[in-house]
Amino acid sequence: MPRALESEKATLEGMAPLEKGPPVQPSLVSPHHDDPLPLYRIPSLLVEESFEKMKDLKPFSLLLNQEDVEECDWLEHLAFDSIEAASREKIEYRLAVCGELCSGIFSSAYTTTSTPLGALIRSRKFPSIDSSDSDRKRILLGHIIATKHRHRTVTDDSMDFPSNWRTKYQLSPSTGHDEDGETVCLHSLAVHPDFQNQGLGKVLLLSWVQRIRDSGTGKRIALLCRERLVPFYERSGFKSLGPSKAQYGGGGWVDMIMEFGQDRNDDGF
């Protein structure tokens, strides 16, 4: 489940390494895809407000795929309670069938780095940033994972996945990702606990929403959140539909939705 109010559990989508000076529109390129992603304009005010907290991280964003399952599973279970966290197989399923809807925010550092990044690197094994610099490790700081579904809101069926997905791919299954669905279901918006409260959540959410909207992927975005997070999502353009019927994680969720096609403000949102 997404939760980003107190902890800002998210990160910056499409942001180049941060530097002083006027904001630059970056060209985001994923190593998992040959074609560069479109440009997405981040409101300069948001970047300026978050700069001081994010500048040491030098974050970069990539689309996710099955190669990222280990890191996403690790992060998911750090960021969420066990009752809410998606299982490893569910994460693998989502990254396999609709990785284009899923994004990760990364940083990199050496084990000798005397910052929180260095301490984190020394706590477990991380993949190298590339083969030419195997000592510099790539760290997943946050991820956003989503699927599509036919229902207007997030349901228990949309949260689930077909048990035989590995051997029998279905374009429009009754559970899980539906390629013909017009609702993008935001299931997981998370940031590593050591890097929360750094202003990343709102920036990621706004930029990810813009990418989904501009790509024509669906007609709306839907998510579930706890009551205390409703104001955060409302400020980000979502509308509360009241208590959800979904019982995932014991229930108690609020349905939130953002319909596309409405007038945008000057920042493009």
Image (cartoon, rainbow, N blue to C red):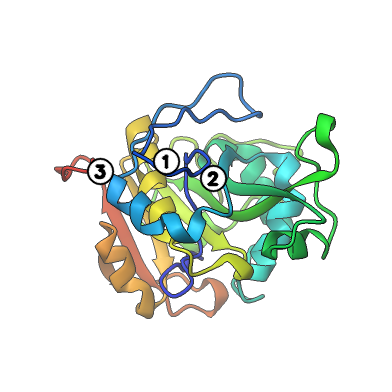
Residue 220 spot, x, y in % from top left: 32, 46
N-terminal of the two: label 3 or label 1?
A: 1
The residue under label 3 is which amino acid type?
Phe
Asked if residue 86 is positioned above or below residue 144 in the image, the reply reads below
- Is disc 3 in contact with disc 2, using a CB cutoff of under 8 Å? no
**Callout 3: helix, strand or loop?**
loop
The disc at residue 177 is 2
Viewer-proximal residue among 23 and 148: 23
In space, the residues marked 1 and 2 are separated at their CA atoms by 8 Å
Residue 204 spot, x, y in % from top left: 44, 52
Quick check: 190 left or right of 74?
A: left
Residue carrying label 1: 181
The residue under label 1 is which amino acid type?
Gly
N-terminal of the two: label 3 or label 2?
A: 2
Q: Residue at x 61, y 19 (%)?
A: 34
The disc at residue 260 is 3
Question: Is residue 72 visible in the rendered structure shown here?
Answer: yes
- Is disc 3 in contact with disc 1, using a CB cutoff of under 8 Å? no
Name of the residue lying farthest toward the top: 35
In space, the residues marked 3 and 1 are separated at their CA atoms by 14 Å
In space, the residues marked 3 and 2 are separated at their CA atoms by 20 Å
Q: Residue at x 54, y 36 (%)?
A: 100
Viewer-proximal residue among 157 and 24: 24
